[in-house]
Amino acid sequence: MERIIITGGERLKGRVGISGSKNAALPIMAATLLTNGVTTLSNIPRLKDVTTMARVLRTLGAKVEFRERELKIDTTNVDRFLAPYNLVKTMRASFLVFGPLLAKLGRARVSLPGGCAIGSRPVDLHLRGFKELGAEVSMGGGYTQVKRDGLIGAEIYLDFPSVGATENLMMAATLAKGKTTIENAAKEPEIVDLANFLNKMGARIKGAGTDTIRTIGVKELKGTDYSIISDRIEAGTYIIASAITKGDIILEGAKIDHLESLVTKLHEAGVEIKDEEGAIKVKARRRIKAVDVKTMPYPGFPTDMQAQFMALMSITPGMSMITETVFENRFMHVSELLRMGADIKIEGSRAVIKGIRSLSGAPVMATDLRASAALILAGLVAEGKTEISRIYHLDRGYERIVEKLSNLGAKIERVTV
């Protein structure tokens, strides 16, 4: 069993490279199923979720080859439509092969998805959208199946701006006959990146990044070369790492325009953040103050940064409140921060935090991907040693985090016990 051990108290300094976006890479990998050819993706992060998606594609008949920061995917011989339980159960993003398979092969059978246990994330918006496009949907034995001989463009309204549903339906619409409009679509940068990739393959998509996405179906898409955007959540985590340690860090490759809500809140707290020609510079030498945040769909404050922000607020003087509106079970990290001495009270969907002078190192357990990052951040400033178990979550979303933090001056190591 592996654990991360941190000795807190070091001020982080230096430069850190931000990896390619996991949440952009996974749907783009799925989108290659829409073609009959070879696609080369660059700036690919080496993460467990990326490896899992590669296994899903191979199961469907694709050839997938890793080359340093590149991924070569040949979908010429894709002829299978079953995404099995043993893969899909470990990563919710596996469900994103549904739209491409339906559009390309006319049918798909995919196990209901798994992933982090941060709350209910039903796939009904995906399935309702497929029905609007003319597909027949059935469920049984833990699998969902859709089939249709040719999709027809439709007007689709999403009750919630779901990222996954927007991606799945946008991909399916690329090969549907006629025009598809998705209203109340998700606006995340990863949606825009997927649309840009699809358009480079020959799709006709407009409006990505707004709440209305229009797609005119084409007969076929072709393989291409494409570079993935940088990971805004990884960047946000290192921004807070600098803030919480009163550090001085330059994040290379990070895009500040993808982080406006986080940057605005950190500016309000007194953290100095500057855009420097393709990089972000973060300083937090002065005393920062407590601020409230409320998670919202993009461009609101990201739920994927809530746990990390809570770690920062736990040692920030004053009272702050974090309201979680996206996932109903995303305060599981609170009990672990309490073990480190934090003063946090849960009131329904709100966490009320009284900042204390310092945290104390303690044995803690990671409950999900972003909670893992939050515990690392807390450990960076805690007095004494912090030992984090169940760190396998980290491998799903943070590339070489121990190495990167160590290069910035943190006393952190990954050990096998």
Image: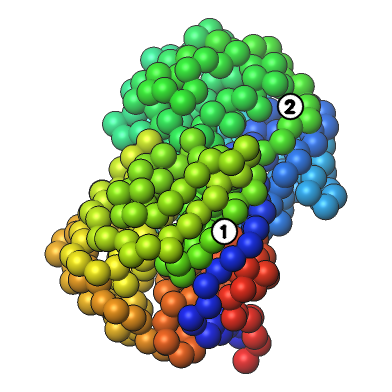
Quadrant occupied by the N terminus = bottom right
- The structure residue drawn at horizontal position 52% and vertical position 72%, both measured from the top left corner, is 11
Query: In the image, residue 247 lies at what x, y percent?
Result: 50, 65
**Residue furthest toward the front?**
286
For image coordinates 65% across by 19% down, the residue present is: 199
Relative to 358, 192 lies left or right = right
Q: Is residue 299 left or right of residue 344?
A: right
Q: Which residue is mark 2?
A: 35
**Residue 249: which numbered mark, if any?**
1
- Let me know if residue 333 appears in the view: yes
Q: Secondary structure at mark 2?
A: loop
Residue 281 shown left or right of residue 181 in the figure: right
Q: Amino acid at mark 2?
A: Thr
Between 399 and 289, the one lying in front of the other is 289
Q: How many marks?
A: 2
- Rendered-image quadrant of the C terminus: bottom right
Q: Position of residue 4 (x, y in %)?
A: 57, 81
Choose between 66 and 77: the one closer to the eye.
Answer: 66
Tell me where residue 261 sits by quadrant: top left
Going from N to C along the chain, the mark reached first, 2 or 1, is 2
Label 1's element? strand
Q: Position of residue 329 (x, y in %)?
A: 30, 61
Of residues 73 and 143, the one nearer the viewer is 73
Above or below, comparing residue 86 to residue 136 in the picture: below
Farthest residue, direction left: 347
Measured along the vertical axis of the image, is residue 37 above or below residue 120? above
